[in-house]
Image (cartoon, helix red, strand yellow):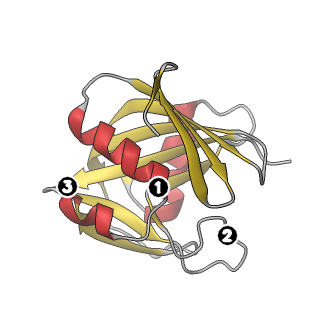
Amino acid sequence: MRSNMTTLCYIEQEGRYLMMHRVKKEQDVNKNKWIGVGGHFEKDESPEECLLREVKEETGLKLTSWKLRGIITFGTDKWQTEYMFLYTADGFEGEITDCNEGDLEWVPCSEVYNLPIWEGDKIFFKLLQERKEFFSLKLRYVGDELVEAVLDGEEEIK
């Protein structure tokens, strides 16, 4: 069984995020959505090891500067609860390569909300832009509908 722990990273450069349009896999919970890069932990990996490996695998880039910004708890009626370590990165080396999971594109931060993204992603994008401190966000979905969002264990924002 795959790990229910994942990483997700938004690499930032010149007011843009590196985003992945998930269009290449038929069986993909994120099919046709735009997300950051990342994935499931492998056996015995730390969050940072998973982050660095997934970014390298999906983009060809080696991160040189990153920051853990929050933990997102995803609950859903479709699969087991997932715990995602959310990072931003602003330093990297190398050239972007093709990815077998989707198309990579630099998207202006101000345009992210106009893309087909998950409703909960809009919440954590806002937190990434407005908050400097670490946050914990719980998102609960029924089907594809966001039915609950709780910030830092107490403030319901949905």
Q: Nearer the viewer, residue 96 or 106?
A: 106
In the rendered image, residue 69, in percent from the top left (x then y), is placed at 38, 31
Q: Nearer the viewer, residue 154 or 65?
A: 154
Which residue does the numbered mark 1 point to in the structure image? Answer: 119
Disc 2 versus disc 1: nearer the observer = 1
Res 134 → quadrant: top left
Gap between marks 1 and 3, in whole Å? 24 Å
Answer above or below: position of 62 versus 156: below
Question: Which mark identifies residue 28?
Answer: 2
* Neighbours of disc 2 within 10 Å: few (<14), some (14-19), many (20+): few
Q: Which mark sits nearer the N-terminus, 2 or 3? A: 3
Residue at the extreme left: 14
Tell me if mark 1 has few (under 14), some (14-19) or many (20+) residues whose alpha carbon lies within 10 angstroms of its own. some
Identity, as a three-letter code, of the amino acid under mark 2:
Asp
Front tag of 1 and 3: 1
Residue 50, image x and y in percent?
57, 41
Residue at image x 59%, y 80%? Answer: 24
As drawn, 19 above or below 51: below
- Front position in the image: 54 or 73: 73
Q: Which residue is mark 3?
A: 13
Mark 3 residue type: Gln
Q: Amino acid at mark 1?
A: Glu
- For the residues labelled 2 and 1, the Cα–Cα distance comes to 17 Å
144 on left or right of 78: left
* Mark closest to the chain's N terminus, 1 or 3: 3
